[in-house]
Amino acid sequence: MLPDDPARALLAEQAAAGLPVLPRLRLLWLAEALSAPAPARALDLNAELDALCTALREGVRRRPGWLYFAPAPRPVPAAVPRCLLQAAVLCWAGGVLAAPGQRAVVQLDAAPGAAFLALRGGLGRTLPADTRALLLRLGAVCGGVVVQSGGRGAFGAAVRLPLAGGLPLCAPRTAADLLGDRYSPLQVFLPGLCAGPAE
């Protein structure tokens, strides 16, 4: 995120004083995610989504098997901001968790020149309101395309992202990074659903 951001500095002071900051941190994270430009470094979507899904499976208090991740057969670099990818997937995951008995499937595939990310699970009516906007921005930030379904029924989304093989890769965060940070995106977007670092 932004190291010299006054809004984040104020939230850090309030957190140090013991005040609750997660709702305001979520709004700040959403604003940053929706306004983030295409980065100068690419993310390997396989590594990023594997870490995120592993952290979700380990951190969310839910029955085993509620989340399935199918990686692409090879690395898929895409020029998308990490905060935007995480926010979109976690908002969607929150909608899946809000619908009883639902399973979540994150599927990544590669084709010549593009990565395809599919999210299936949850109901349109249980999705947080920000989910659709985040997914649309995820496609738009790098010239991709998004298709979404499920107004009130079963939700599904497919995002086509152009590959950015010419860009250097960012080092991915690990599941341990996400699980060990009390202000990680898991804690921000899934408050009360994810075990904290000390739990």
Image: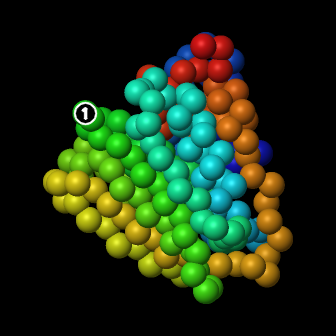
Q: Quadrant of the C terminus?
A: top right
| Quadrant of res 164 | bottom right
Q: Quadrant of residue 174?
A: top right
Query: Which of these two is toward me, 164 or 138?
Result: 164
Q: Is residue 100 left or right of residue 65?
A: left
- In this image, 109 relative to 159: left or right? right
180 and 84: which is toward the camera: 180
Q: Which residue is rendered at x = 35% and y = 43% of the image?
A: 103
Q: Quadrant of residue 195?
A: top right
Which of the two residues, 5 or 199, is positioned nearer the viewer here?
199
Considering the numbered disc 1 on the image, is that residue within a helix, a strand or a loop? loop
Q: Tell me the amino acid under the disc marked 1.
A: Pro
Residue at position x 29%, y 47% in the image: 122
152 displayed left or right of 110: left
Identify the residue at horizontal 55%, vertical 70% (top origin): 109
Say which residue label 1 marks: 100
| Direction from residue 156 to residue 176 in the image, left or right | right
Where is residue 128 drawn, in percent x and y?
Answer: 33, 45
Q: Position of residue 48 (x, y in %)?
A: 66, 53
Q: Residue furthest bottom?
A: 112
